[in-house]
Image (spheres, rainbow, N blue to C red):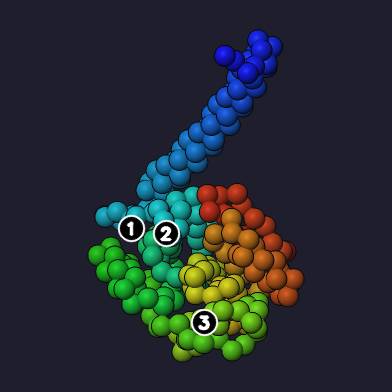
Amino acid sequence: MSFLDKSDVEALEKIISNYSHEVSIKLTRDLVTVQNRIYSQLESLIWLQKRLNIKGSLPPLRGWATSPDVLLRLHTHIMLSAPKIVVELGSGSSSIVAADALRQNGYGQLISIEHSSHYGKQTLAKLVAENLQPWVDLRIGELEAWNKQHLCPSDAVKSPFWYPEHLLKGIEGIDLLIVDGPPGATCEFARYPALPALFEKLNPGAQVWMDDTVRQEEKDICQRWADDYGFNLEYYPLEKGLGILSRA
């Protein structure tokens, strides 16, 4: 015995058919989006490999690592702008790419600030293997409590930590600052201290690059920096997002 008459059954079948069609369209769109993202990263990686003058391979570029599209933009920017001093917060594949560009320019130095001795040693080994160490001043030190200006709320569960001040000794005339650390899990707005600590060391025409601006926290930091320090802010729709702060 059926509790639904023929018209009810037909209406239900129509609803199910429409729903299945909508789901199919959404899945197709999602698949195309993923395919386009994969293609974009592969394309960037191919062009990056053509530009690099290294013998081995880069470290894996998935997970926490800087994505190929950002690395390609970084290498291109350094070769075109020929910066004298590049500072990066957080070492890794970006260290290799930046150092290679400096070496091809035959000019400049990368100062790489890293909090993890484990990852720092991996970066150093790769730099040595590629004979890039002369272009890089790699400085490693555990994070310390940060007691200066910060966006972290006073009642936050995790107190602010940042790189030890002694790692910044002697740094002056920064042309490019790349902010890709400390890790976001360190505390809320973990990367904020970069400009309070290094603003006075920037050259007038310096750019500040913030990786991972698909995250709202990094966007909030960029906007605060732009407001407080008079930078123009532009976002680039790369895989993990990139915010670039510069002056006109």
What secondary structure is marked by label 3? strand
Please identify the quadrant where the N terminus is shown: top right
Pointer 1 local density, CA inside 10 Å: few below 14, some 14–19, many at least 20: some
Q: Secondary structure at mark 1?
A: loop
Query: Where residue 48 sits in the image (x, y, percent)?
Result: 41, 49
In front of the other: 23 or 201: 23
Please tell me whether residue 61 is drawn above or below residue 187 in the rendered image. above
Q: Residue at x 55, y 50 (%)?
A: 238
The C terminus: image quadrant: bottom right
Question: Is residue 125 depicted above or below 75 in this figure?
Answer: below
Work out whether mark 1 precedes mark 2 in sequence or the reverse, and give the earlier one: 1
In the depicted structure, whether residue 187 falls above or below residue 144: above
Question: x, y (%) of residue 35?
Answer: 48, 35
Judge left or right: residue 100 versus residue 217: left
Residue 133 visible in rendering: no
Viewer-proximal residue, 63 or 113?
63
Query: Is 162 left, or right, of 244 in this rendering?
Result: left
Instruction: Give the distance between the C-alpha atoms of the residues marked 3 and 1, in whole angstroms.
Output: 27 Å
Mark 3 or mark 2, which has the lower sequence index? 2
Q: Residue 59 has which mark?
A: 1
